[in-house]
Amino acid sequence: MAHVLIIGAGGVGGVVAHKCAQAVKSGRVFDNITLASRTLSRCEAVAQSVTARTGVSLATARVDADNVAELCGLIRAVKPHIVCNVALPYQDLHIMDACLECGVHYVDTANYEPPDTAKFEYSRQWAYTDRFREVGLTALLGSGFDPGVTNVFAAWVMRHKLDEVRVLDIIDCNAGDHGLTFATNFNPEINIREVTARGRYWEHGEWVETDPLAFSMEFDFPEGIGRKKCFLLYHEELESLVTNLNGLQRARFWMTFSENYLNHLNVLGNVGMTGITPVPFQGREIIPVQFLAALLPVPASLGSRTKGKTCIGNLMRGVKDGQKKTVYIYNACDHEACFAEVGSQAVSYTAGVPAMIGTKLIAEGLWAKPGVWNMEQFDPDPFMADLAEYGLPWQCVDVE
Ligand code: NDP
């Protein structure tokens, strides 16, 4: 039985805590959960909800995860086997340093980003590979939905459905509606940095850059969602998938946005509110996107008002037994059902469930392997079985 330390008590952290508690309740894997974050009251609110829903008690703690000494103090006091990092990408390297120093495994859901550059790349985390390998610890990167489940979907399709893959399109649809004029479904600062960054996709062995949101297509989503416009973005799982999937000729990532969301983002961008460069204001410096994030609702508060579904999946074209074949593998998730189960909307839920499963598979030893790994580098089968069991059932259909 393992003791898990969850760091970050936001939208995703709340779901991870509920899902770990469900595993405790069924007598599996975890026997102890500690939830730590920058604001203790957020941890306490999650702990209350977990106890009310599952009867399982969590320990809570305050920690500044940008401070490695403080993190090590907490880890030595709590003595977890594994840390599940669902704070912000800025904390990834600090938490990895603390895990190495204290001898515990590491899981996250988003790759490291330096605060002053909106640039997502794995290089700084892959650089820890030798250090994790030498001390026999596992670091699992990107165990959310996208990245995360989308990587595992790709690995599962390569094991069971295709001999070779030529084209990968990851398509992320949030067809939910929270009824607010403008809000983001995960951390506002990270969301806006991602969407306003230049687009990028992989074609014939090289990266092609585009202006932000310059390309779009329509996709007909299943489960009653229907046709939606999707925009090409750069997304971090493309980087590891083009390295780990052989034969890929094109890999792209698409996301749906409502016209209302894009109009607001355009206006905010035009007046400089999405910028990440410090601006002098009344004798001090502020970062516009951080000020904007402070005005927007926290993602955890959207659960009670969001209706509709998300649908995230991979469209993969390749060859099976010498014949051309295309498959679509996806999960559709209902916002209101997530709220009824754990008090969160589906974007937090679809990221939090896989974060718990990645943590669980390492704790069980099934995905424990010294080094730093992306999700598609492990056996996809136990992960796919857990997805269905822990609330994210999936479908794989032949398209042609
Ligand atoms: P939230 O903003 O809701 O929560 C982030 C939490 O991290 C907050 O509780 C915050 O504390 C805490 N935090 C921030 N800085 C620190 C710090 N220095 N020390 C300790 N705690 C800190 O974000 P989400 O829950 O929506 O997102 C969490 C992570 O999940 C992000 O990295 C996001 O990119 C990732 N994500 C991944 C997805 C995937 O599919 N792979 C999908 C969605 C999100 P405080 O309460 O004090 O602000």
Image (tube, grey):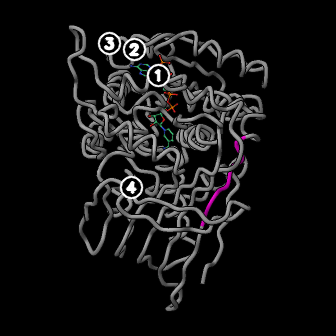
Pointer 3: residues within 10 angstroms few (<14), some, or many (20+)? some
Q: Which image quarter holds the N terminus?
A: top right
Between 162 and 269, the one lying in front of the other is 269
Q: For the residues carrying marks 2 and 1, which lies nearer the camera in this image?
A: 1
Q: What element carries label 2?
A: loop
The response on whether ligand 1 sits within 8 Å of label 2 is: yes
Q: What residue type is labelled 4?
A: Leu
Between 12 and 122, the one lying in front of the other is 12
Q: How far apart are marks 2 and 3 (CA)?
A: 10 Å
If you read the primary sequence from the N terminus, does the residue marked by circle 4 or circle 1 appear first? 4
Segment tinted magenta in the rendering: 329-335
If you read the primary sequence from the N terminus, does the residue marked by circle 2 or circle 1 appear first? 2
Q: Which image quarter holds the C terminus?
A: bottom right
Q: How far apart are marks 4 and 2 (CA)?
A: 31 Å
Asked if labels 1 and 4 touch by Cβ distance under 8 angstroms, the answer is no
Write down the residue under mark 2: 64
Percent of width and height locating residue 282: 24, 9
Write down the residue under mark 3: 69
Q: For the residues carrying marks 2 and 3, which lies nearer the camera in this image?
A: 2
Q: For the residues carrying marks 3 and 4, which lies nearer the camera in this image?
A: 4
Between 238 and 32, the one lying in front of the other is 238
Write down the residue under mark 1: 295
In the image, is residue 88 above or below residue 254? above
Write down the residue under mark 4: 233
